[in-house]
Image: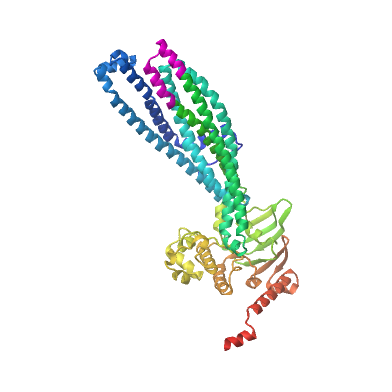
């Protein structure tokens, strides 16, 4: 991935354009140069049409005499027979010009799109790579819909700017230059008159383009809002239908549709304003040409050929001039998109390797120690305060406590998804901030309640634990996780698709796939975050057995909502308000009569009440017996 320079996100047009040229287009300078060469050839050859028309009319007016040819063409006319013989050669010359124009146009179009598409690919790769290596705090700042919008809407506008605006602008400017030279040759007085009129019309077009850039930024922001709204509606379809929220969600989406409609209509009106401006100035220019040329022909200072060639050149030059107006709008929209893309790429992650970071060296299962650790997600709202504990290698430690006590925060600090606000987290005596992130996370496996499965095969999802694992190793991991039996019952076995978010599997099956993935990774440190809380009793028993096999010989931190699952832990830490308020084994903690005992009584009472509610009544049993 190309490194991003920390400049050019303040919206300045020159800075942004310079950055695009320097950092993103420079690697393709040879393709761009070849494309420009074909553009030059195309503009030069196509600009000869007015000269061919002039020669044709001059020959017809001079009844085929050599003298009717322009001086530069007379030697050629004499060489091929002169007079009418040379005139008959003109259709072949027109054909040659047409073929060359078509061929050069093809190559410049292919080459210009080649470099623009490659550049867009690089932008997408840089954005995605940045997000993949961004820390969790940075990813949490933006909604996923807004991030997706940058890959779709912003990148599309960038492609329009690169593929059409920059390329089209270069092509049109070259045509204007060559046609201007031809027009000066045909009639310099008329050309100067045109040159005075057209710049006057360019000023309002430029002002409109700048307004379009601001409007484009608003449209892109609303597009991100729309993507986020749609994503929430589709992923939450079950909840929306269950609670009868269809009309509410429809109203929310409609407001976004309406805002985008109004902004896009405003942009369309802005673009449309360029057309009457260019048409008006074109009309003035054409009228002026007719008046001046008429006087010159009557005075004998210009020929019909000069006038005819100039009339052909005028619409030819008008078309690229007109295109520049719309291309400027596309360029401004692309610059607005580039500003947002660079803002994303330049957002430096807070979690990064130190320049002198070394690989984490773990002996055996690894000892984890928290020393006076404090952490805050936001200023003034501490999530952890002076947390002190040590987990010996191979021990299983449970973290319990009410919601918001800081249990998940502790788990997040071990693989350095966040950095501590104060204090130190060490593994085998090594500060996690002093080792490379890659080596740290290689030593850690995570199984959580929210299982992440990708829309791929079962085998591919397990293999993510260790991509270089062999087929036998994948299957052994699945067997150890009690997953092999149900996998082999699927239509395609290990090649069966799990579906989007694992929707083709049950909750227990998804958990066992995740455990198999952790088994395959074979990391010395294991983090279990509510790994069985969403399962039914039958699935929980299967998963608990698999987790017991997975935890054996590993340093394990367990967060469990059901306290019955942590009774056998080597040590239990009870958290409340971001602090460790109790610590010990299950029986000792219950004997203290503190928070842990209250949590146990509350949960066991709830479990008994739930069992009683699920048990059949006496009448039900009697009826069942009948």
- Give residue 576's position: percent from left, percent from top: 72, 63
Q: Is residue 355 magenta?
A: no
Nearer-the-camera pick, 68 or 530: 68
Direction from residue 31 to residue 454 in the image, left or right: right
- Height in image: 103 above or below 611? above
- Give residue 282's position: percent from left, percent from top: 49, 25
Nearer-the-camera pick, 185 or 515: 185
Overall secondary structure of the magenta stretch?
helix
> What span is colored magenta in the figure?
290-316
Occupied quadrant, residue 175: top left
Direction from residue 507 to residue 29 in the image, left or right: left
* Quarter that holds the C terminus: bottom right
Direction from residue 35 to residue 331 in the image, left or right: right
Q: Is residue 296 magenta?
A: yes
- Height in image: 419 above or below 553? above
Going 34% across and 19% down the picture, which residue do you hit? 57
Residue 177 appearing in the image = yes
- Height in image: 622 above or below 553? below
Going 60% across and 49% down the picture, which residue do you hit? 256
Residue 339 appearing in the image = no
The scheme the figure's colours follow is rainbow
């Amino acid at each position: 991935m190309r490194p991003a320079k920390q400049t050019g996100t303040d919206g300045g047009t020159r800075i942004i354009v310079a950055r695009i040229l320097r950092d993103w287009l420079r690697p393709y300078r040879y393709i761009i140069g070849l494309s420009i060469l074909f553009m030059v050839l195309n503009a030069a050859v196509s600009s000869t049409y007015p000269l061919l028309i002039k020669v044709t009319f001059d020959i017809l007016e001079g009844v085929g005499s050599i003298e009717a040819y322009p001086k530069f063409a007379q030697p050629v006319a004499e060489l091929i027979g002169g007079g009418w013989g040379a005139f008959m050669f003109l259709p072949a010359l027109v054909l040659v010009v047409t073929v060359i124009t078509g061929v050069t146009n093809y190559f410049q179009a292919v080459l210009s799109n080649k470099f623009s598409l490659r550049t867009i690919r690089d932008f997408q790769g840089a954005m995605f790579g940045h997000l993949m290596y961004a820390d969790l705090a940075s990813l949490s700042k933006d909604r996923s819909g807004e991030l997706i919008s940058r890959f779709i809407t912003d990148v599309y506008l960038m492609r329009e700017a690169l593929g059409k605006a920059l390329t089209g602008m270069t092509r049109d400017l070259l045509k204007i230059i060559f046609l201007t030279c031809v027009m000066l040759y045909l009639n310099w007085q008329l050309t100067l008159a045109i040159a005075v009129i057209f710049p006057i019309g360019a000023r309002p077009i430029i002002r409109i383009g700048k307004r379009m850039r601001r409007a484009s930024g608003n449209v892109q922001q609303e597009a991100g809002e729309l993507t986020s709204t749609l994503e929430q509606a589709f992923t939450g379809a079950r909840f929306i239908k269950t609670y009868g929220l269809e009309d509410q969600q429809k109203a929310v989406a409609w407001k976004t549709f309406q805002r985008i409609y109004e902004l896009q209509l405003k942009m369309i009106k802005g673009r449309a304003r360029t057309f009457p401006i260019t048409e008006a100035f074109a009309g003035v220019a054409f009228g002026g040409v007719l008046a001046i040329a008429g006087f010159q022909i009557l005075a004998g200072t210009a020929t019909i050929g000069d006038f005819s060639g100039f009339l052909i050149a005028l619409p030819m030059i008008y078309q690229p001039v007109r295109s520049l107006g719309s291309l400027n709008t596309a360029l401004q929209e692309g610059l607005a998109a580039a500003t947002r893309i660079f803002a994303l790429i330049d957002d430096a992650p807070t979690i990064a390797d130190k320049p002198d970071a070394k690989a984490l060296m773990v002996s055996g299962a690894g000892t984890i120690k928290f020393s006076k650790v404090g952490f805050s997600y936001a200023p003034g709202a501490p999530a952890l305060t002076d947390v002190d504990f040590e987990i010996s290698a191979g021990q299983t430690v449970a973290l319990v406590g009410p919601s918001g006590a800081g249990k998940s925060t502790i788990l997040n600090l071990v693989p350095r998804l966040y950095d501590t606000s104060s204090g130190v987290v060490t593994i085998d005596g090594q500060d996690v901030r002093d080792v490379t992130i890659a080596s740290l996370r290689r030593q850690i496996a995570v199984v959580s309640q929210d299982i992440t499965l990708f829309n791929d095969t079962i085998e591919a999802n397990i293999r993510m634990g260790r991509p270089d694992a062999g087929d036998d190793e994948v299957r052994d991991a699945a067997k150890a996780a009690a997953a092999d039996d149900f996998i082999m019952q699927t239509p395609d076995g290990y090649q069966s698709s799990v579906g989007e978010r694992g929707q083709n599997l049950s909750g227990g099956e998804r958990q066992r796939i995740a455990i198999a993935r952790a088994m395959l990774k074979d990391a010395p440190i294991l983090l279990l975050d509510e790994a069985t809380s969403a399962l039914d009793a039958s699935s929980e028993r299967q998963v608990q057995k698999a987790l017991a096999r997975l935890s054996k010989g590993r340093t394990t931190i367990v967060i469990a909502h059901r306290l019955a699952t942590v009774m056998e832990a080597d040590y239990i830490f009870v958290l409340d308000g971001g602090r460790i308020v109790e610590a010990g084994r299950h029986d000792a903690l219950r004997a203290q009569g503190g928070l842990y005992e209250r949590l146990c009584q509350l949960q066991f009472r709830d479990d008994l009440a739930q069992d009683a509610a699920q048990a059949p009544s006496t009448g039900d049993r009697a009826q069942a017996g009948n």
